Image (spheres, grey):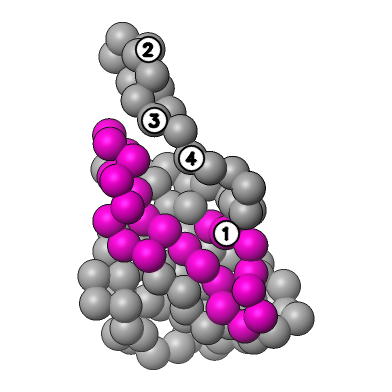
Amino acid sequence: MWDLKNYSYLYSIDGSDVREIKVSPGIVLVIKKTMKNHLPLQLLNVETGEVLKSISPMIHRGVPVDIIEQFNEFLLIKQKDRCLKIIDVSCFACKFGFLCFSV
């Protein structure tokens, strides 16, 4: 990661088990390779790379993940033919339950 103001090097992320990285204001979401029926995720401080939270929400085994998005303190996870999960990462709970729709 580099500082876009002066292009100085800030930190790096070990990519050995990383599937995807998403950056949003203040936060880096690191999506790791699925382990059995869990999806390991890390939320990092965008400026320092410090791990703010590591969570591993349950997912349906063998079902592809269509969408993983971060929206403020909420994480949206949608698997093919399954309900949308909205997870409050501040307390790691399914605060709003599930919304069902087909994509």
The tag earlier along the polypeptide, 1 or 2, is 2
Q: CA distance from mark 4 to mark 2?
A: 17 Å
The disc labelled 1 sits on which kind of residue?
A: Lys
Residue 88 placement: quadrant: bottom left
**Is 46 placed above or below 30 here?**
above
The disc labelled 4 sits on which kind of residue?
A: Ile
Badge 4: residue crowd in 10 Å (few <14, some 14–19, many ≥20): few
The tag earlier along the polypeptide, 1 or 4, is 4
Identify the residue position indicated by label 4 in the image: 13
Which residue is at 66% across, 80% downward? 36
**In-front residue for pair 82/12:** 12
Identify the residue position indicated by label 1 in the image: 32
Mark 4 element type: loop
Percent position (x, y) of residue 19?
Answer: 63, 53
Residue 11 badge: 3
- Residues at badges 1 and 2 in contact (C-beta under 8 Å)? no
Q: CA distance from mark 1 to mark 4?
A: 12 Å
